[in-house]
């Protein structure tokens, strides 16, 4: 989708079977035209979007790839087969580490801004923190947290404070938790009243945006660290599974199970005043 023109171009489609589908996408860091695509078969593909062609396809998983995260030339993929694979996309033998700690699907995956720590969340309610130096077959994360009571899909590293990670979990949990990933300390836990599907930090202020499911399928903007609720945004009619922030930080996109995308003006840069949902 081209924000300047509103035009939509189809990059790829999958006809490998009635249930074949794209299960995750992730742009390479620092711009560029390369897009990682996770597929229901377990393959992880790398595409050049400007050229409209697939550069390579990387194996290693036996089930769908539902989570992807970049750390420079390392692409990490999390799968329903419970494993995480670190792929070095520069070399032919791309599998440089296989991380095994989860007992169910890996549904959340994100590298810290400094590239030192990979956070993973699973349908087994586990949150794991992995060192960037992990190699080969690794079964021991740096930290393994069991505090959440539901699947940990929402993960977001603070852009303002090193080693600060926010996590959110599903219907049986409903909390946003904040962690010091250096010490492993749980800093705070807030009951939001509904499942937490996604989290995004404001690039401009110490604020965090959460998206939710039943019953109201809303977005909530919170002040950090007080966790005072600033505003709620309602439009979706089903759980808001994903959020993305534009490169300039000005626009938030939400994608929900109601099959709609909504564009929001939420994160105001320091020069602007007021926050308006559109």
Image: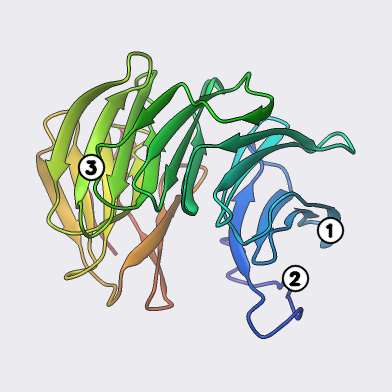
- Say if 145 sits above or below 45 in the image: above
Cα–Cα span, label 1 and label 3: 37 Å
Instruction: Name the quarter where the C terminus is drawn.
Output: bottom left
| Label pair 2/3, CB-CB below 8 angstroms | no
Which residue appears at 20% of the width and 24% of the height?
187
Q: Which of marks 2 and 3 is in front?
A: 3
Q: Is mark 1 on a helix, strand or loop?
A: strand
The residue at which mark 1 appears reads as 54
| Label pair 1/2, CB-CB below 8 angstroms | yes
Q: Pick whichever, 278 or 212, lies toward us.
A: 212
Label 3 neighbour load within 10 Å: few <14, some 14-19, many 20+ = many
Cα–Cα span, label 1 and label 2: 9 Å
The x, y position of residue 275, in whole percent, is: 23, 49
Q: Quadrant of residue 135?
A: top right
Instruction: Name the quarter where the N terminus is drawn.
Output: bottom right
Cα–Cα span, label 2 and label 3: 35 Å
How many marks the image carries: the answer is 3
- Give whichever of discs 1 and 2 has the lower sequence position: 2
The x, y position of residue 255, in whole percent, is: 42, 66
The x, y position of residue 241, in whole percent, is: 38, 62
Q: In which quarter of the image is residue 267?
A: top left
The residue at which mark 3 appears reads as 176
Residue at far bottom of view: 18
Q: Is mark 3 on a helix, strand or loop?
A: strand
- Determine which of the numbered discs, if any, sits on residue 12 in the image: 2
- Determine which of the numbered discs, if any, sits on residue 139 in the image: none
- Give whichever of discs 2 and 3 has the lower sequence position: 2
Which residue appears at 73% of the width and 32% of the height?
73
Q: What element carries label 2?
A: loop
- Viewed as shown, does residue 48 lie left or right of 241? right
């Amino acid at each position: 989708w081209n924000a300047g023109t509103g035009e939509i171009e189809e990059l790829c489609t999958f006809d490998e079977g009635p249930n074949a589908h794209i299960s995750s996408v992730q742009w390479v860091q620092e711009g560029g035209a390369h897009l990682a695509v996770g597929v229901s078969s377990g393959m992880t593909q790398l595409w050049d979007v400007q050229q409209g062609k697939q550069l390579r396809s990387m194996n290693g998983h036996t089930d769908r790839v539902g989570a992807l995260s970049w750390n420079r030339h390392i692409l990490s993929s999390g799968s329903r087969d419970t494993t995480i694979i670190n792929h070095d996309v520069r070399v032919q033998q791309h599998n440089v580490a296989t991380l095994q700690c989860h007992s169910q699907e890996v549904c959340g995956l994100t590298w810290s801004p400094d590239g030192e720590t990979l956070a993973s969340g699973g349908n087994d309610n586990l949150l794991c923190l992995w060192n960037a130096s992990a190699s080969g077959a690794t079964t021991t994360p740096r930290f393994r947290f069991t505090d959440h009571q539901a699947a940990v899909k929402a993960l977001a590293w603070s852009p303002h404070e090193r080693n600060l990670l926010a996590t959110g979990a599903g219907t049986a949990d409903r909390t946003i938790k904040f962690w010091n990933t250096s010490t492993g300390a749980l800093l705070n836990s807030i009951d939001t009243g509904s499942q937490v599907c996604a989290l995004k930090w404001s690039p401009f202020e110490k604020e965090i945006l959460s998206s939710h499911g039943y019953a109201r399928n809303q977005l909530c903007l919170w002040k950090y660290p007080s966790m005072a609720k600033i505003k709620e945004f309602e439009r979706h009619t089903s759980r808001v599974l994903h959020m993305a922030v534009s490169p300039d930080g000005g626009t938030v996109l939400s994608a929900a199970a109601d099959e709609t995308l909504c564009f929001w003006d939420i994160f105001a840069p320091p020069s602007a005043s007021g926050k308006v949902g559109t």
